[in-house]
């Protein structure tokens, strides 16, 4: 059973704003392509992740949350691309938490969201390894744009802000070792 948000009016507002909202197919496809590009950027920075994903080449993973769905296929290069229409999913991951605010709160606490998994167990284990071990070094990417020192300062500021948000969301749970983003 999902927990209630402490801000039910925000959930109601979100529901009202998104009720009947269906973006055009071209916008959905473009968002999915950008998501795949971002995931590939992160995967490309971790050689072991690419090796593990390359072993799953041709396998399709489907991720769902509410009415949103994205289907990706693993490539021989160890990256991801949009799955062709009609391709059967080997693994389906469904976020069970409906509230975007509860998902955000859980993410700020450092918790993994509750996920229903259907499909190949070995493929699910590889995806779980990716989730547990691959991290986006946003500070490194930012340093390419603005330089090392400013990127480091921005990174420190973001880490402090995340730590403060974690303490606000779950008082007493965010200790000194949990402040990194």
Image: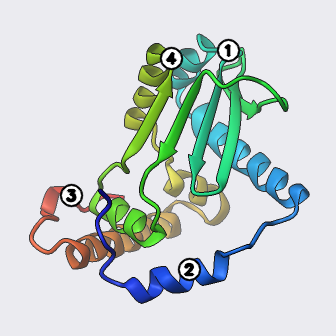
* In the image, farthest residue toward the left: 172
Circle 1 sits in a helix, a strand or a loop, which is it? loop
Q: CA distance from mark 4 to mark 1?
A: 14 Å
Residue 57's label in the rendered image is: 1
Q: CA distance from mark 3 to mark 2?
A: 30 Å
- Comparing 53 with 119, the one in front is 119
Which part of the image, by quadrant, shows the N terminus? bottom left
Circle 2 sits in a helix, a strand or a loop, which is it? helix
Crowd band around label 1 with a 10 angstrom C-alpha radius: few (<14), some (14–19), many (20+): some
Q: CA distance from mark 2 to mark 4?
A: 34 Å
Q: CA distance from mark 4 to mark 3?
A: 33 Å
Residue under label 3: 178
Please say if the residues under marks 4 and 1 sit with CB atoms less than 8 Å apart. no
Residue 120's label in the rendered image is: 4
Name the front one of labels 3 and 2.
2
Q: Answer with mark 1 or mark 3, whichever residue precedes in sequence.
A: 1
Taking the spot 41% from the left edge, 21% from the top edge, the residue there is: 125
Q: Answer with mark 4 or mark 1, whichever residue precedes in sequence.
A: 1
Q: Answer with mark 3 or mark 2, whichever residue precedes in sequence.
A: 2
Taking the spot 45% from the left edge, 32% from the top edge, the residue there is: 117
Taking the spot 67% from the left edge, 47% from the top edge, the residue there is: 69
Measured along the vertical axis of the image, is residue 24 above or below residue 65?
below
Crowd band around label 2 with a 10 angstrom C-alpha radius: few (<14), some (14–19), many (20+): some
Position in image of residue 154 (x %, y %) = 46, 71
Residue under label 2: 14
């Amino acid at each position: 059973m999902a927990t209630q948000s402490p801000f039910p009016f925000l959930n109601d507002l979100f529901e009202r704003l998104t009720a009947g909202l269906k973006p055009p197919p071209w916008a959905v496809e473009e968002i999915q392509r950008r998501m795949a590009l971002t995931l590939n950027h992160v995967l490309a920075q971790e050689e072991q992740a690419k090796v593990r994903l390359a072993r799953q080449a041709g396998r399709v993973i489907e991720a769902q949350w509410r009415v949103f769905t994205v289907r990706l296929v693993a490539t021989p290069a160890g990256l991801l691309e949009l799955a062709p229409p009609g391709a059967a999913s080997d693994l389906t991951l469904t976020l069970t938490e409906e509230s975007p605010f509860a998902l955000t709160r859980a993410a700020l606490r450092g918790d993994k969201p509750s996920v229903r998994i259907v499909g190949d167990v070995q493929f699910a284990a590889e995806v779980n390894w990716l989730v547990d071990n691959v991290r986006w070094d946003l500070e490194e990417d930012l340093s390419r744009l603005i330089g090392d020192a400013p990127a480091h300062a921005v990174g420190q500021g973001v880490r402090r802000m995340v730590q403060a948000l974690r303490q606000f969301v779950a008082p007493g749970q965010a200790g000194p070792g949990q402040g990194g983003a």
